Image (cartoon, rainbow, N blue to C red):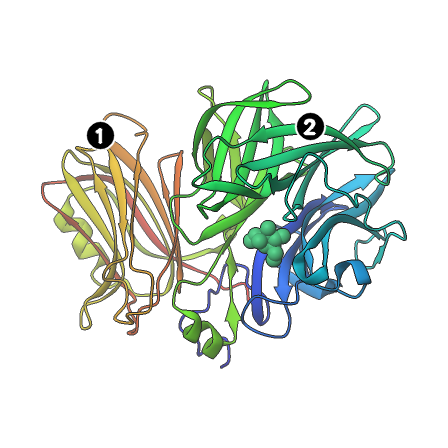
Amino acid sequence: MSHCSDPHRPQYHFTAPQQWINDPNGLIHWNGEYHLFYQYNPHAAYWGAMHWGHAVSRDLVHWHHLPVALAPDKDYDKDGVFSGCAIVHDGKPVIVYTGVSANGMQQFPCLAYADDTLRTFHKAPENPVIHARPDHLVHDFRDHTMWHDGEWWYQVLGSGDGTHAVAPLFRSMDLISWEYLGRLIQSDDAVNEQLYECPDFFASGAQHVFITSPLPMRRVVYMSGDFNGRTFTPQKRDYVDHGSSFYAPQSFTDATGRRIMFGWCQEHGGDQLSRALGWSGVMTLPRIIALDDAGKLTYTVAPEVTVLEDETLAHGRDITLAQAQTLLQHVAGDALVIHATVSATTTCEFVVRYDPQSKEQTIIRWDAEYQTVICDLSQSSLNQNCVREQYRAPIHRDSSSTLTLSLYIDHSIIEVYAGSHTVFSLRVYPTHPAQRCTIRAQELLHISELVVRSMKSIV
Ligand code: FRU
């Protein structure tokens, strides 16, 4: 199926040219280029034979696909080149990834040195650079986050001890010989968190942030708290994203000092649909993340994304519900952005990917009374194989009864930014064109601003 005839394929979010992708890997801003590597199966639209796919961008928005960076072609990684990060050591970029062998039972950190343009890679002869697991850790011993301090490189992995998820901490001067320093953190929830996947750990002001995707929970959490050089003590904790498609994000600091996150959004339309379409997986838009004074993460879409905002299809200031409905009457599209600032005391609903004929619709409901946003996918598609969950999150309102919302609608992906602390990534697969949107409310709303624009394609 060609891309443009595929109604579900995103047009302004990053997707691979074809086949399966999962986690973003090796995010780095190097010599003026943003590099996005990703878990990639070049052979099929399902998980398997993990490679590192590779794309570059100068503006964080338009991506140029490059050849596969790393393939599973060594004894120690023949069962997969799993997730990892990119660092700069002695002025040269280096990739740190997990080499998987012995049918998945051996998972160890490996290095690949890159040339100055980050286009060619050669695996270190010393691989794997850690080849024994300390501290009774299980064979799931993978995914890497690193930082440099003084003469030392510090590395945190994702693992578990058979009961609890554990993030082991190591240090090295040369990336080759590593010393185990102990558990950076271990979970105390043995039901939901037996394995940490994709740890991400960084300083933010006086605090530190630990982000991980624990199994079997399969949702992404962050913790903010104190790091004493060996152990991390969380103080605050929340979901990073309130939709269930979002997983395994990674963040990095770019040349402007911003912390930028990409996450993987898996398909929620059922395996059959992905196999028929020939692709699976999409990256979120770049998110700027920062801790506020209360130790909570805030999220904004990178301002670079506004270059994609195209024709204004509706615009109103200080309008009523009826006026908003009239403005939206003729809006149609499957690649749109909606920015709105609304005041309400009961509930109001933004209805998107809406088809009046089939009644397919995705509802983003703000319950002002209970200070909650609910994303309701129960009517998003007539296809019964699709995930049709309802997601809810409490909202930290910008002011007493006002909510600022941005909805990034791109075919099968919708990113909902509600206030500054809450994001939902949603996947929807209407069977009809579902290009309409509207607003519904129980009361007379006040809408201080409503803007709908079409979005340009990046593919
Ligand atoms: C997370 C994950 C990682 C692993 C990779 C394999 O989605 O399971 O833990 O490195 O995917 O593709």
User: What crowding class fits label 1: few (fewer than 14 Cα within 10 Å), some (14-19), or many (20 or more)?
Assistant: some
Q: Is residue 432 left or right of residue 227?
A: left
Percent of width and height locating residue 442: 10, 44
Percent of width and height locating residue 274: 46, 72
- Answer above or below: position of 423 versus 291: below
Q: Nearer the viewer, residue 348 or 126?
A: 126
Q: Is residue 412 left or right of residue 105?
A: left
Q: Nearer the viewer, residue 449 or 281?
A: 281
User: What crowding class fits label 2: few (fewer than 14 Cα within 10 Å), some (14-19), or many (20 or more)?
Assistant: some
Disc 1 target residue: 401
Q: Residue at x 24, y 25 (%)?
A: 400
Q: Earlier in the sequence, mark 2 or mark 1?
A: 2
Percent of width and height locating residue 349: 20, 48
Q: Amino acid at mark 2?
A: Gly
Q: Nearer the viewer, residue 190 or 69?
A: 190
Q: Nearer the viewer, residue 35 or 112?
A: 112
Q: Residue at x 42, y 75 (%)?
A: 272
Q: Residue at x 66, y 63 (%)?
A: 50
Residue 65 in view: yes
Disc 2 target residue: 182
